[in-house]
Image (cartoon, coloured by chain):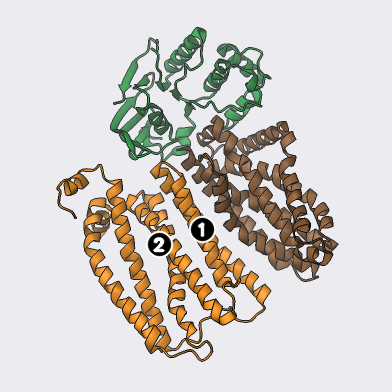
Amino acid sequence: MRQMIGPFLALLKRDLLLAFRHRGELANPLLFFLIVVTLYPLGVSPEEALLRKIAPGVIWIAALLAALYSLENMFRSDFDDGSLEQMALSPYPLSLLVLAKVLAHWLVSGLPMLLLAPLLALFLAMPTPALTVLELTLLIGTPLLSLIGSIGVALTVGLRRGGILLTLLVLPLYIPVLIFATNAVSAAAAGMAVTGQLYFLAAMLVLALTLVPLATAAALRISLS
Amino acid sequence: MNDPEPTLQARGLECVRSDSLLFSDLNLSVRAGQVLQIEGPNGSGKTSLLRILAGLTPPSDGEVLWRGENIARRRSAFLSEVAYLGHQLGLKAELSVEENLRLSLALNGLSFSHESLAEALRTVGLTGREDTPARALSAGQRQRIALARLIMSSAKLWILDEPFTALDVGGVSLVETLLEAHLSCGGLAVLTSHQTVRIDRRLVKLPLA
Amino acid sequence: MWTFFHKLASPKHFYRISGYLISWLGVITALLLLAGLYLGLFVAPPDYQQGESYRIMFVHVPSAWMSLFIYVFMAVLSAIYLIWNIKLADVMASSSAALGASFTFLALATGSLWGKPMWGAWWVWDARLTSELILLFLYLGYIALVSAIEDQRSAARAGGVLILVGVVNIPIIHYSVEWWSTLHQGPTVTKFDKPSIHISMLLPLLLMAAAFQLYYFTVLLIRARAEVLDRERRSAWVQEAFSGTEPR
């Protein structure tokens, strides 16, 4: 088989280039992330002790919602203009191309969330050891969100109003990530061990990296047929 | 691949879309140097048939054979020899002509030099447009980018859905010229078109219902 | 043997064979249900800890088992459909979805009813109830996806992929929820732990489980038959069978 790295890099490069050409829109999911977090002190209570307690959950739930918000773009444009079709006609495995697109999506929508985390930790009175673990969970968790989400997007990309359905399909699958990520951060804040939780997240990431591209590719072919 | 001769065959194809039967028990055969034109009124399943032949849609019954083998079984080998031009051209509006073509060819494991790009653009009438973003071009010009993609690929089988769309008289004869050249090099083509296709080669017609 | 399955997979034969099976299955289901309910409600002694209210477990536990069984069964059917393209497998999978969702809902409702006399609340975030709730979302997601896609074949294949993804996730979700639950409620037993199972309680429980199982298959066959008729309505055997004016 010819070099697989060629098309993978070409597609990754193209998606990053396209994101750059739309760079005005790049900040939107991040702003969404920020605003959702700020709603909690406003809607619940600005009391420090309470905020500190709910901070991991608040940040991670906001991250889930922001991920859902940005997921729609993963395949929509390519589906509409026929680029996805051309990818499905490539002799290279569609799962390889999916991996390139998911990676691009994460680099553009997921990774920046790590940059925002310190600000959010400040808003929610999170202690520093917890912040480090928060960044770690985001580092392992956000690629998971992009990966798992890609299956839902692939299944619904052909539908006219797939947005709400996407949420229903993807959120239950996000729950394990939510549970382990938030617990890791809470444990860190309390000075307890976090290795177990992080290993579990890493294991999920590895599993997702191997299985998800195949499922997403299958789903894309179904949406294209 | 066991058959050295490039041939496309279909046996007993059936297509059901949204609960209605478009066609069933359809057979066809295209040899090297031949072009098959699918004819039929709107909604008769022309595009569906082309998509089945390209491997995009699985038929509800029957099989498609390339070089004697079922395309679903040796998918990668088949896809490396086929080029599909559908209603949607597969071009990104924000990318330039060159950037679009770079990706399209990379997806097939091919790359090109500036010279070969310039040559291809000259053939399709887009000289000097390497860096123009696709959105700045007219529909006819975008169709020509897709044609450039066709000739730069090494595909033996061309599947073209309404390739004359948006093209002026010059564009139409360009497509016909490209087809002739492709066929005389041993390639095959399947296409649909509302208008008459004028080529010297063996043109076989297949009417749908 | 293989020809038997091949015949069964043909819609026409399935229609005929299932017609016979349904009445038998229905009768056995009713018998098992009566036996189970009688033993469970009248014969089994009251639990020394929970008194009479534990009896709801005879409905709650089998429902929960069925909700999980049906999902896994749907996954197997979907795999069969996606790999071997046997349409009957998809008919059975899609006919099972509403049943699976209903059992899940029943498990949740009975869980809630059980919780009220025990813990004073209509809902508790216990591991099993939470897992059941997430399972309900998975079922609803499947149903929503399949009904949103217009082309029937694509809908079937998309649903199949979703169910297979879901079935891989179920152990992960279950483990996560269990883990989460022990964190927040300490190492004490999960609230809906069955009381120590005595044979007088085990027997009705198993009878009820068997009854629910056969109930599922009975209703599944009824729904699948109707679905098969609908899908094959254009074919010769359906036209023949229903061209007369006599009601079936």
Q: Nearer the viewer, mark 2 or mark 1?
A: 2
Q: Residue at x 57, y 48 (%)?
A: A164
In percent of width and height, residue A159 lies at 51, 41
**Quadrant of image for the C terminus of chain C:** bottom left
Q: CA distance from mark 2 to mark 1?
A: 13 Å
Q: Amino acid at mark 2?
A: Leu
Amino acid type at circle 1 is Leu
Nearer the observer, A1 or C207: C207
Residue tagged by mark 1?
A: C138
Instruction: Identify the residue at the far top of this view.
Output: B169
Using residue B67 as the reference point, say whether residue A185 is left or right of it: right
Q: In which image quadrant can residue C119 be found?
A: bottom right
Q: Is C145 rendered above or below residue B40?
A: below
Q: Is residue B184 left or right of residue B93?
A: left
Q: Which chain is orange?
A: C
Residue that label 2 marks: C99
Which chain wears green?
A: B
Residue C16: where, in percent of width, then height? Answer: 21, 57
Q: Colour of chain A?
A: brown
Going by the image, does B168 lie left or right of C98?
A: right
Residue B85: x percent and y percent?
A: 49, 25
Q: Chain of mark 2?
A: C
Q: Residue at x 76, y 68 (%)?
A: A187
Within 10 Å of disc 2 (Cα), the crowding (few <14, some 14-19, many 20+) is: some
The N terminus of chain C sits in image quarter: bottom left
Do we see residue C73 in this rendering? no
Residue in the foreground of this view, choosing between B188 and C175: C175
Chain under callout 1: C
Q: Position of residue C179 (x, y in %)?
A: 63, 71
Label 2 SS: helix
